[in-house]
Amino acid sequence: DIQMTQSPSSLSASVGDRVTITCRASQSVSTYLNWYQQKPGKAPKLLIYAASSLQSGVPSRVSGSGSGTDFTLTISSLQPEDFATYYCQQSYSIPMTFGQGTKVEVK
Amino acid sequence: EVQLVESGGGLVQSGGSLRLSCAASGFIFSDYWMHWVRQAPGKGLVWVSHIHDDGISTSYADSVKGRFTISRDNAKNTLYLQMNSLRAEDTAVYYCAREVRLNGYNPTNHFDHWGQGSLVTVSS
């Protein structure tokens, strides 16, 4: 199975901050890497697919980059609605493993 | 509007069985591969199982292999997860999710729609 490791596990930030979350795969997943946002008590929401493609309806302050084993999710200017937990997922092979999550909290 | 609505969760004793359903609407259900993903209380997302559009090919996480069975009824637009020999560690919210698969220059597969989740609690 491909292991996905996110860092950090949590971070504290303020509105307007630039936030970066990294995700590393234990082997190459090409660009089969997706990012999801989850708020408490809610289902995950797709933000980024194929490493860098923005899902329809997701604000342009959210972006993704990377290929192979190293990936990044960036929020250029954090907004109040962005405080949540973020997960990366590799869809290169079954099982489609997720990272452990990164919780973005209010500083 | 695409909708996925899970049902069938609840409290069950260890060793018992439960069947989850996921009713799909707003899209051609038979065109899509479908998945189950679970989340234990306070924990992260864990992929459980998937099924191809024709219902023939399936895969399972090692932790549920031999105990869980995924199936679908394309005529009823419904996905199922039969869970047998349940254990305390199966306690989780179970989500169904639709997989989008795109070929071409930048191929991808990802989960673009998720259900609201169904809570399964296994008491020991």
Image (tube, coloured by chain):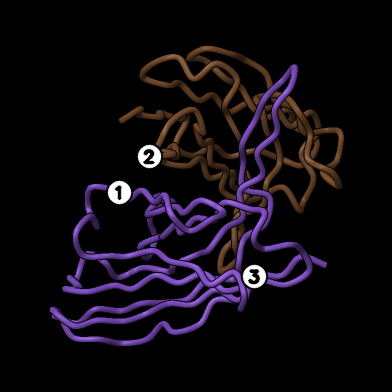
Chain colours: A brown, B purple
Amino acid type, label 1: Ala
**Which comes sooner in the sequence, label 3 or label 1?**
3
* Badges 3 and 1, same chain: yes
- Residue B70 sits in which quadrant? bottom left
Q: Say how many tags the image has.
A: 3
Q: Quadrant of residue A65?
A: top right
Question: Circles 3 and 1: CB distance less than 8 Å?
Answer: no
Mark 1, Cα crowd under 10 Å, few <14 / some 14-19 / many 20+, is some
Q: Is residue B53 left or right of residue B105?
A: left
Left or right: where B106 falls relative to A33? right
Q: Chain of mark 2?
A: A
Q: Is residue B8 left or right of residue B90?
A: right
Query: Dot 1 falls on which chain?
Result: B
Q: Residue at x 74, y 22 (%)?
A: B104
Q: Tell me: B115 left or right of B2.
A: left
SS at badge 3: strand
Q: Which residue is mark 3?
A: B4
Q: Is residue B93 placed above or below A32 in the rendered structure?
A: below
Quarter in which the C terminus of chain B is drawn = bottom left
Q: Which residue is mark 2?
A: A95
Secondary structure beneath label 2: loop
Distance in Å between CA atoms under marks 3 and 2: 22 Å
The span from disc 3 to disc 1 (Cα, nearest Å) is: 22 Å
Disc 1: which residue: B61
Of A5 and A33, the residue lying toward us: A33
Q: Nearer the viewer, residue B17 or A65?
A: B17
Give the Cα distance between marks 2 and 1: 6 Å
Q: Are marks 3 and 2 on the same chain?
A: no
